[in-house]
């Protein structure tokens, strides 16, 4: 018996609307800045700002981006999405730690031990990347606590201000979370390698710098908010007016 035409099935191509695409882009940038900041974090730098001597790591270069993106994710995708990205970042940090450790265990080629070898040697590789391992471990210890604190404080301030005062929840959540992050990561990374006085100086310097950066990022937070809301037409999650796990249905 001749059968009729087969009814069309679902489109095998996944549809991504603007909201999904933005989420993927923000996640990629967030994870990249997080991992690169950990890897380069072993390099210490000094600077004089407003008459104060700051000692911090070059990991501070990408970290302000993570502050900004955490607030954007929290604002436009809600608490559950921000927590999910936090866990994704943690998992990829563990993966990075594992890859670097395995790479360090693989023996170097004999030619790299020659006196005229000008490439990467075992000593330089281990000094850079195994030094970064300690920074990655320190970051992992502080990461989950500080990120979940940031998300919780952001949501609390958003609820207390009835979705108003974006600058307050953005700066306030960063101030609390980065205090926790700075104290934990500095003690874990440098204990046994520096005196307590030097460690405390790094904490004061790093946290003071992070606080100034958080305040300085306020105009960028409003700019990102405007670009996402007006430019892309994506509305923020409003506490009391929309569920945290709001889903935007894809249009065929």
Image: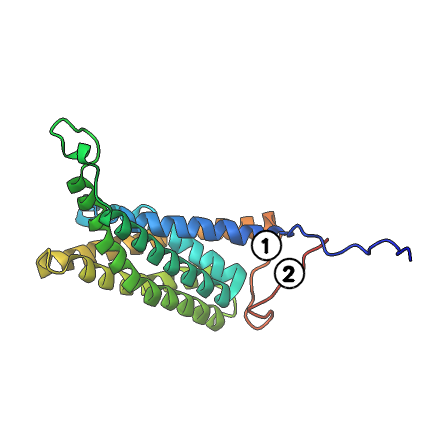
State the residue at coordinates (41%, 63%).
87
Disc 1 secondary structure class: helix
Is 142 or 182 nearer to us in this picture?
A: 142
Q: Name the residue at the top extreme.
A: 116
Instruction: Confirm or deny contact between disc 2 and disc 1 (CB under 8 A).
Output: yes
State the residue at coordinates (55%, 69%).
244
Q: Is residue 150 left or right of residue 103?
A: right
- Residue 177 placed where, x, y %? 33, 64
Q: Which residue is mark 1?
A: 19
Q: Which residue is mark 2?
A: 248
> In the rendered view, would you say 2 is above or below 51?
below
Q: Quadrant of residue 147?
A: bottom left
- Residue 212 placed where, x, y %? 30, 53
Is 194 or 252 nearer to us in this picture?
A: 252
State the residue at coordinates (60%, 70%).
241
Disc 2 secondary structure class: loop
Count the numbered circles shown.
2
- Residue 150 placed where, x, y %? 38, 65
Can residue 48 be seen at all in this image of the molecule?
no
State the residue at coordinates (18%, 35%).
110
Q: Residues within 10 Å of mark 1 (few under 14, many from 20)?
A: some
Can residue 93 be seen at all in this image of the molecule?
yes
- Residue 21 placed where, x, y %? 57, 50
Q: Going from the N terminus, do you reach mark 2 or mark 1 first? A: 1
Q: Name the residue at the front extreme.
A: 1
Q: Residues within 10 Å of mark 2 (few under 14, many from 20)?
A: few
Q: Name the residue at the right extreme.
A: 1
Q: Quadrant of residue 203?
A: bottom left
């Amino acid at each position: 018996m001749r059968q009729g035409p087969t009814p069309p099935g679902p489109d095998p191509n996944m549809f991504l609307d603007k909201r999904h695409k933005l989420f993927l882009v923000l996640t990629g940038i967030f994870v990249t800045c997080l991992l690169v900041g950990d890897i380069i974090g072993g390099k210490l730098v000094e600077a004089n700002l407003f008459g104060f001597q700051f000692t911090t790591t070059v990991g501070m270069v990408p970290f302000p981006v993570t502050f900004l993106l955490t607030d954007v994710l929290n604002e436009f995708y809600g608490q559950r999405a921000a927590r999910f990205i936090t866990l994704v970042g943690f998992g990829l940090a563990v993966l990075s730690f594992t890859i670097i450790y395995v790479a360090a265990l693989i023996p170097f080629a004999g030619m790299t031990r020659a006196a005229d070898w000008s490439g990467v040697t075992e000593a330089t590789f281990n000094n850079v990347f195994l030094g970064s391992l300690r920074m990655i471990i320190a970051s992992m210890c502080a990461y989950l606590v500080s990120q979940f604190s940031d998300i919780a404080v952001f949501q609390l301030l958003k609820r207390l201000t009835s979705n108003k005062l974006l600058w307050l929840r953005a700066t306030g959540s960063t101030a609390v979370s980065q205090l926790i992050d700075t104290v934990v990561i500095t003690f874990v990374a440098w204990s046994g390698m520096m005196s307590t006085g030097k460690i405390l100086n790094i904490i004061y310097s790093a946290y003071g710098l992070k606080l100034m950066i958080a305040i300085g990022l306020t105009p960028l937070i409003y700019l990102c908010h405007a670009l996402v809301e007006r430019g892309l037409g994506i509305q923020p999650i409003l506490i009391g007016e929309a569920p945290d796990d709001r889903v935007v249905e894809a249009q065929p």
